[in-house]
């Protein structure tokens, strides 16, 4: 898909994935998720091969229960709101502890020692991972900052995370969540992830009076085949970045419009996303 330079009066809507695209959460969501399930359903759960990459949290919950031979009955479904409440509470508590330790200089972020996203997907319990601070992936802070100053760009989020836990993750990594004015989340009503980008687009149109967004003006940036799929399913532009579980070649198999090894080439990525040179 070819993107022309942005014409006067038109804008671009950039829809960012979070995990593996903007940040590495270092297992923060995995630990909190499994602990919340145990609190609510009264037994321990393991991932048993269930991977979080590109999935929405409601889908992950069902997949984990199935992988642990726990029947998703009407009674189990009725307890899901309680799972989300405890999930958010546990994640916020861990994030507060990590931030306090960093502020006390007792924990120094070290990206060379943090688990990869692939390792997160093979963890078996919260106890198998040492809590470490989520960190921002290469080029992200500078890129978000430059894009926030471009008047023709609206930045938003499209993520499988619940809205509340998405904000906790981003803040824990040091990202200013006010940079994202719209979003669609795993906590929104949806059949699958493909429903989320148009929901974010509609919210942008509602929020900004006179905003016009053609399909080629909406760009989904993510690190998994599911991110590519949810863009292509809506005829939006897909930009893949190989900073998660999938390398460049694996992502190219799914025919994204553009693919980057990472976001460290600020000028090149900025020009692609904003439609104008930096």
Image (tube, rainbow, N blue to C red):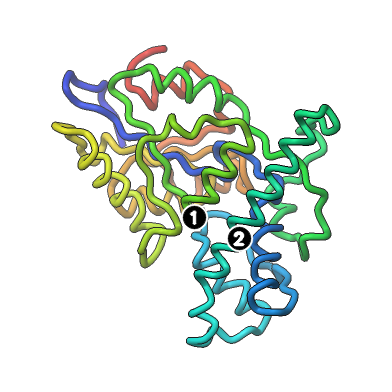
- Front-most of residues 126 and 79: 79
**Residue 212 pos. (x, y %):** 17, 34
State whether residue 52 is above or below residue 166. Answer: below
The answer to whether 174 is drawn above or below residue 51 in the figure is above
Q: Nearer the viewer, residue 272 or 174?
A: 174
Q: Residue furthest right?
A: 106
Place of residue 175 in the rendered image (x, y in percent of width and height, measured from the top left): 56, 31
Mark 2: which secondary structure? helix
> Which residue lies at the image location 39% right of the left edge and 25% below the top edge?
272
197 left or right, relative to 24: left
Secondary structure under the numbered disc 1 in the rendered image: loop
Looking at the rendered image, the quarter that the C terminus falls into is: top left
Q: Image quarter for residue 37?
A: bottom right
In the rendered image, residue 145, in percent from the top left (x then y), is placed at: 48, 20
On screen, residue 186 above or below 203: below
The quarter in which the N terminus is drawn is top left
Nearest to viewer (mark 1 / mark 2)? 2
Q: Nearer the viewer, residue 176 or 86?
A: 86
Q: Which residue is mark 2?
A: 87
The reply to whether callout 1 and callout 2 are in contact (CB within 8 Å) is yes
Taking the image as shown, residue 109 lies to the left or right of residue 76, namely right
Q: CA distance from mark 1 to mark 2?
A: 10 Å
Residue at 52% across, 86% down: 75
Q: Seen in the image, is 278 located left or right of residue 99?
A: left
| Residue 90 percent across, percent down from the top left | 66, 56
Q: Residue 162: which disc? A: 1
Q: Quadrant location of residue 61?
A: bottom right
Going 55% across and 51% down the picture, which residue do you hit? 165
């Amino acid at each position: 898909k070819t993107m022309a330079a942005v014409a006067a009066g038109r804008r671009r809507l950039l829809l960012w994935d979070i995990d593996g695209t903007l940040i590495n959460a270092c297992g923060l969501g995995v630990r909190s998720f499994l602990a919340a399930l145990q609190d609510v359903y009264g037994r321990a759960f393991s991932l048993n091969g269930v991977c979080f990459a590109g999935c929405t949290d409601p889908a992950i919950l069902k997949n984990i229960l199935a992988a642990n031979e726990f029947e998703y009955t009407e009674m189990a479904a009725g307890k899901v709101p309680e799972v989300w409440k405890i999930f958010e509470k546990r994640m916020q508590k861990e994030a507060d502890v990590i931030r306090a330790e960093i502020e006390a200089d007792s924990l120094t972020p070290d990206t060379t020692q943090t688990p990869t996203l692939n390792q997160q997907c093979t963890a078996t319990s919260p106890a198998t991972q040492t809590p470490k601070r989520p960190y921002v992936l290469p080029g992200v802070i500078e890129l978000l900052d430059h894009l926030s100053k471009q008047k023709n760009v609206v930045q938003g989020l499209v993520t499988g995370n619940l809205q509340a836990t998405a904000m906790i993750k981003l803040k824990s990594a040091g990202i200013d969540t006010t940079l994202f004015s719209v979003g669609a989340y795993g906590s929104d009503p949806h059949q699958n992830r493909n429903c989320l980008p148009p929901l974010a687009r509609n919210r942008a149109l509602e929020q900004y009076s006179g905003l016009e967004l053609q399909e080629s003006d909406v760009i989904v940036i993510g690190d998994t085949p599911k991110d590519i799929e949810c863009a292509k399913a809506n005829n939006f532009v897909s930009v893949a970045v190989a900073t998660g579980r999938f390398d460049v070649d694996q992502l190219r198999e799914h025919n994204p419009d553009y693919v980057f090894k990472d976001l460290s080439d600020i000028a090149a990525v900025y020009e692609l996303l904003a439609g104008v040179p930096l």
